[in-house]
Amino acid sequence: HDLRNEDLKDLRELGQGNGGSVKKVEHLPTGTIMAKKIVLIDAKPSVRKQILRELQIMHDCHCDYIISFYGAFISDPNICICMEYMDKGSLDGIYKKIGPIDIDVVGKVALAVLEGLTYLYDVHRIIHRDIKPSNILFNSKGQVKICDFGVSGELINSIADTFVGTSTYMSPERIQGAQYTVKSDVWSLGISLIELALGRFPFAESSSDDSDLSDFEGTLSPSRPHPTISLTREQKDKKKKRKSKGVSLQGGGMTMSILELLQHIVNEPAPRLTPEGRFPREAEDFVDSCLLKDPDARKTPKDLLKHSWIERSRTATIDLEAWASTF
Ligand code: ATP
Ligand code: MG
């Protein structure tokens, strides 16, 4: 039952992230369609083996809201992680294709993510660490599942440096260097839900009287939610070398600094589901409680499962399978 690279036939590329790329593949001996994530790891063989061992926990994750795991192997110099293929892709791709996502669907997404996070933490003591629309997947059966959670401490260490781009979903306390907790995932969920409901990354929103903010309005548009992803290798190297100085990043004729965005997250009021009145009160309230800047005041995923909007979403009869068939 061991997975081997030779048994996997590439079908097409599903996407590229900061850490590597993901391909749709067929496992020839069984005919199973899988998603194969290829992560380039610049580490010693012993570290690679350690990562592989840590990834095995994923075999024990059985939850309707978590992507199934088929196995992982080393294919020098990469680590390949094979997981359940989700035929409708990730929610960022979906909203970029169809526009803002109906708030009732967003409610189902919130419920699924909270269930997944609660399972990971209660059963395995795993904190996700990378909740964002591209890590929330959808299929034509109408299922919503999360992927790319931080099971391997070694893997997190090995690719930490390449993950600058994900910092935009990072909670204020994480930006300030505090310990990661399940509540940091709740913040990232709040940002993600606004992004889905509005069809654009929330920090692109500007109160027009705030000139600082409008400076990076153009760069943080829905098509470019990760300002650093567009960096070339060369720019990245430069950024690394000058890390401490707050380098300005050029993009689409605009200039912004990652530091400015991070400072904004720390110092300014959290984004909200706006304009007021467009969305149900309960949804606004839920997002507000995800985005409490003080992590002590913010609830855990488990507590938030009791929120009235989530309870309502649980019993809502909206047909996600039918919705999936519309795109
Ligand atoms: P980052 O590298 O910043 O985390 P990302 O999540 O977009 O960004 P990857 O995790 O490498 O990067 O994934 C790339 C794309 O592949 C995702 O955006 C998603 O659309 C697609 N993808 C990932 N896993 C699956 C899967 N199991 N089934 C279908 N599509 C997938
Ligand atoms: Mg991902």
Image (cartoon, rainbow, N blue to C red):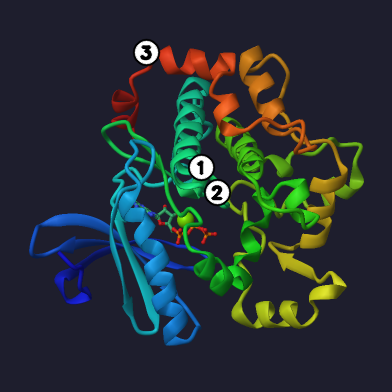
Q: CA distance from mark 2 to mark 3?
A: 30 Å
The answer to which of marks 1 and 2 sits earlier in the sequence is 1
Q: Is residue 115 placed above or below 149 in the rendered structure?
A: above
- 2 or 3: mark nearer the eye: 2
Q: Which residue is mark 3?
A: 317
Q: Residues within 10 Å of mark 1 (few under 14, many from 20)?
A: some
- Which image quarter holds the C terminus? top left
User: x, y (%) of residue 31?
Assistant: 10, 57
- Position of 48 relative to 167 (above/below): below
Give left or right: position of 206 versus 113: right
Q: Secondary structure at mark 3?
A: loop
Which residue in the protein does label 1 denote? 121
Residue annotated with mark 2: 127
Front residue of this view, candidates 98 and 56: 56
Are dots 1 and 2 in contact, CB under 8 Å?
yes
Q: Quadrant of the N terminus?
A: bottom left
Residue 132 left/right relative to 286:
left
Q: Secondary structure at mark 2?
A: loop
For marks 2 and 3 on the same chain, the one whose residue lies earlier in the sequence: 2
